[in-house]
Amino acid sequence: MRIAALYSHLNGKEYLMVHRLSLWKEVQKVIENVDAEACRTKVCQERHRKGMKLYSPVDMNKAFKDGLEGLGWAEQRNTFWVTADEGLLRDVYGRPANDQKAAIEEKGLDPIFSYNQTDFVKERVAVEIQFGKYAFVAHDLFVKHLSFYVSGIIDVGIEVLPMKSLESEMSSGVPYYERDLLNVIRQGRGVPAVPLVLIGVEP
């Protein structure tokens, strides 16, 4: 595969170029090593394209997973406790998880354990490969990457998406770079408040 388009949000790419160049090169190499045609294994069941061979999100995800994990990228979780009290949540969010739980209990409320999970993290850089449903991209950008960033776990997040040209040869409901680029830039320059690199890939 190849990188067809790229957007640097809040200097995400520039940060990588200066502070994590080796990791940036690893991500580029993994993308280059994914054989898209080998992932064209899904037989379409949709009426208007029945029987067509489409690119398989499962196979592409596995190819990326194998490549990144082979270079030491690994899943990581950010755990925290929540409750329905808005003011208390604002007060405890930045604290360590055990302190959050204790503070909620001190108020006589029931703490609820929760977490955000990112598939690939290495040296304070997170990567999400998104060939699933389009709604998951907003969750990645506005919840996962942001949560890891404000919790001091990462300095930048990378989101890999198919270009429209690739998405059109996949099952319906898959995200594509051009639409999610708009979703980011129409929020304004500072939202989400985390340095990001959006990457659009194609065969």
Image (cartoon, grey):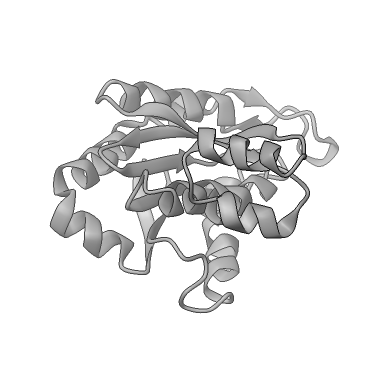
Q: Quadrant of residue 48?
A: top right
User: Residue 150 vs residue 122: left or right?
Assistant: right
Side of 28 where 158 appears, left or right = right
Q: Position of residue 121 (x, y in %)?
A: 36, 35
Residue lying at 52% horizontally and 33% vertically, measured from the top left: 98
Residue 56 in view (yes/no): no
Q: Is residue 171 above or below residue 84?
A: above
Front-most of residues 149 and 57: 149
**Residue 198 drawn above or below residue 183:** above
- Residue 52 x, y percent position in the rendering: 68, 31
Q: In front: 154, or 129?
A: 154
Q: Residue at x 44, y 54 (%)?
A: 150
Q: Is residue 54 left or right of residue 149?
A: right
Q: Quadrant of the N terminus?
A: top left
Q: Which quadrant does the C terminus fall into? A: top left
Whether residue 6 is visible: yes
Percent x, y of residue 106: 68, 40
